[in-house]
Amino acid sequence: MAGRGCSGGPGHLNEDNARFLLLATLIALYLLGGAAVFSMLELANERQAKQRWNERLANFSRRNNLSLDEVRGFLRHYEEAARAGIRVDNVRPRWDFTGAFYFVGTVVSTIGFGMTTPATLGGKIFLIFYGLIGCASTILFFNLFLERLITVIAYIMKSCHQRQLRRRGALAQESLKTPGKAEVDSLAGWKPSVYNVMLILCLASVLISCCASAMYTSCEGWGYFDSLYFCFVTFSTIGFGDLVSSQNAQYGGQGLYRFANFVFIFMGVCCIYSLFNVISILIKQSVNWILQKVGSSCCQQCQRRLLQSRRNVVMPGNVRNQRDVSIETDGVVESDTDGRRLSGEMISMKDFLAANKVSLAILQKQLSETANGCPHSANVLSRDSEFSGGVGALAVMNNRLAETSRDRKK
């Protein structure tokens, strides 16, 4: 990695800092690229819409003998009413019990559409404390849901692998020699890919989104693509608020529709959250691969400079041998090892499938160690520490607490 090869200078970055800076740089470039694309796609349409609105506003004021200031003043009053939930079309009450339940669901899930917001001072104060506990509890629930989802996926993948082994006759042949031990030996080297987990989560997310979109197209009157757009914005907890479900006053089968809407949003958020966690692991692997390549290149350049500076002291034959050994040790061996670890077939599920129970904390730890190329000795320190486990930001916090605790003990 970048921090292992050519270190020694006081300003040299370790692996964690290099990874953080590289990811921050990539995110900044990603934001700049996204801003450029969206500006190119949407700016012209915004200008056209503004021009059409100004023309309609001028025509309305001219037909009704009203000044533009009077019309704009009336529209400002309507904007104030709209913030309280008043609309031109007939919509259901925002703050009856079902409307309030829909609102708190968008709060604790961090969706936050913005269509319904508290207007009173008491409601705003209560929202601060309510959201603090509710969002934290929901994030914990998502982590636990992801752990059990990984358990189910791993169990299914193990069952499929066992079925394939039985078809090949491997288990039957081994059972004749050592009965009871053949299945364990046949599964000892089995390593399912993290990409399979991501593929399963993608398929589940797409299936839920397609089914939900069909329902929204029928009940809300949206286009199917608009419904898919709404599903992604909602399930990913972005929640723009340009499209919001269950806002009309009446629906056919209203009670059933609102229940189905709640179930689809709940399941969609859980699946997309799980998918984001898996994708974040792959992004971290990609960042580590970039750092490994950059670090390997820097190491080779440093070795060449060092050998050139010693050209007059060491014999040419020894220089060639020394260069081969140093480059092979620092570059080829580590690169090859990391390449094998990043091949995709690197997640050993043997420890996870004991008693059909998988610990997501262990899974997250092993995936992170695989991406970082950390030795297994770090696992022992992590297990001995009172801080362990977690997903995403929770895992980062626990790992840092564990490192701090070990430093204090030393």
Image: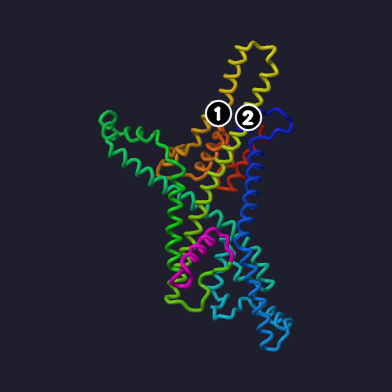
Does the magenta portion include 348? no
Q: What residue would you read off at disc 1?
A: 334
Residue 274 numbered tag: none
Query: How far across and down, in percent of the image, does residue 32 sit?
Result: 65, 52
* Element type where label 1 sits in the image: helix
Q: Earlier along the polypeptide chain: callout 2 or callout 1?
A: 2
Does the magenta portion include 217? yes
Q: Which amino acid does label 1 sit on?
A: Glu
Q: What residue would you read off at disc 2?
A: 4
Query: How far across and down, in percent of the image, does residue 313 sit?
Result: 69, 12
Question: What residue appears at the point 42 percent right and 40 percent down from the top-left corner?
Answer: 192
Q: What residue type is labelled 2?
A: Arg
Location of residue 349 by image quarter: top left
Q: How many labels does the image show?
A: 2
* Element type where label 2 sits in the image: loop
Q: Do the residues labelled 2 and 1 touch (CB within 8 Å)?
A: yes
What residue range appears in magenta? Answer: 216-240
Question: What residue appears at the point 56 percent right and 41 percent down from the top-left corner?
Answer: 286
- Along the line of sight, which residue is nearer the eye, 28 or 114? 28
Q: In which quarter of the image is the C terminus?
A: top right
